[in-house]
């Protein structure tokens, strides 16, 4: 089973840069998308359902903003759109597809980098989504949560960790929250399970400022986080950088 997660920073922009053509070559079973920046009326037929895939989406109410989606080869048994929390759901941040005992989630946690109000909202989302993540971990299902978590967990997960300790995405409280998911709740960071070493190859996002991409001054903020038994079945993880479809790079994981 191959699963891909990709923050597109606009599905229309990514499609114009070749994302959907690239996707057809990947033989992925499920593809999780974040930051669609589109509503249903903006989507082409290919964006709604690429050849060989079913497509499901949770759009943000605000035009040109946020939104998540899932493409899958097999039609799911159930689709869960949103968390039942009005302010979070209005931004289109959670979509779950269920296939038998397997759940695949596309998640887009908010960024707090634009100001204090958004950072406060981010902390609020982290607090309120935690019980749901705890319940998923205890559900007995195999679950993988794919997405842009907007948090770099450890110092090895970003280039300039010393200069970002007071910045959103690497705040102590955010890192502790993510660490708690791994240590106490029991979720597994699949990429780090397969690549425990420190390496500049782990980055999935680069700022558009200061030639960050060219200099590889990046962050690892896109994850596939799985329940333990499913994580044990992960055999390969890849970050694709040969082409740029957005300011993020797609993350692929193969499971036995």
Image (spheres, grey):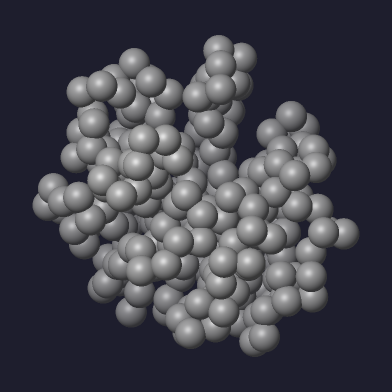
Q: Quadrant of residue 63?
A: top right
Q: Position of residue 133 (x, y in %)?
A: 50, 42
In percent of the image, x 43 and y 24: which residue is there? 168
Residue 147 rendering spot, x and y as whole percentages: 49, 51
Viewer can see residue 83: yes
In the rendered structure, the answer to whether residue 98 lies left or right of residue 188 reads: right
Q: Which quadrant of the structure image shows residue 159?
A: top left
The quarter of the picture where the N terminus appears is bottom left
Outermost residue on the left side: it is 197
Is 68 on the left or on the right of 41, as rendered? left
Residue at screen point 53% across, 31% down? 111
Camera-side residue: 242 or 248?
242
Q: Residue at x 34, y 27 (%)?
A: 170
Give 256 or 91, whichever is nearer the viewer.
91
**Nearest the camera: 2 or 165?**
165
Horizontal relation, residue 140 to residue 32: left or right: left
Q: Is 91 placed above or below 172 here?
A: below
Q: Residue at x 46, y 70 (%)?
A: 3
| Residue 193 place in picture, x, y as percent | 22, 57
x, y percentage for residue 136?
51, 49
Residue 95 visible from this viewpoint = no
- Furthest-top residue in view? 116
Of 69 and 127, nearer the camera is 69
State which quarter of the image contains the C terminus.
bottom left
- For the image, the number of numbered tags is 0
């Amino acid at each position: 089973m191959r699963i891909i997660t990709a923050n597109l920073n606009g599905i229309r922009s990514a499609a114009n840069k070749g994302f959907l053509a690239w996707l057809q070559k990947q033989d992925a079973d499920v593809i999780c998308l974040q930051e669609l920046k589109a509503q249903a009326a903006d989507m082409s037929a290919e964006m709604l359902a690429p050849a060989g895939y079913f497509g499901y989406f949770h759009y943000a109410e605000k035009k040109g903003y946020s939104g998540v989606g899932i493409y899958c080869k097999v039609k799911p048994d159930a689709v869960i759109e949103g968390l039942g929390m009005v302010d979070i759901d209005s931004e289109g941040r959670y979509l779950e597809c269920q296939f038998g005992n397997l759940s695949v989630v596309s998640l887009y946690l908010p960024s707090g980098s634009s100001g204090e109000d958004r950072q406060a909202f981010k902390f609020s989302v982290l607090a309120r989504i935690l019980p749901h993540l705890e319940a998923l971990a205890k559900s007995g299902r195999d679950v993988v949560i794919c997405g842009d978590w907007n948090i770099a967990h450890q110092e090895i997960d970003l280039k300039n960790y010393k200069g970002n300790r007071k910045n959103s995405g690497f705040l102590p409280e955010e890192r502790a929250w993510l660490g708690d998911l791994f240590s106490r709740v029991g979720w597994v960071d699949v990429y780090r399970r397969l690549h425990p070493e420190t390496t500049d190859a782990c980055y999935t996002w680069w700022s558009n400022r200061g030639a960050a991409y060219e200099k590889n001054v990046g962050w690892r903020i896109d994850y596939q986080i799985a329940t333990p038994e499913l994580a044990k079945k992960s055999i390969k993880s890849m970050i694709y950088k040969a082409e740029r479809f957005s300011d993020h790079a797609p993350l692929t994981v193969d499971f036995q």
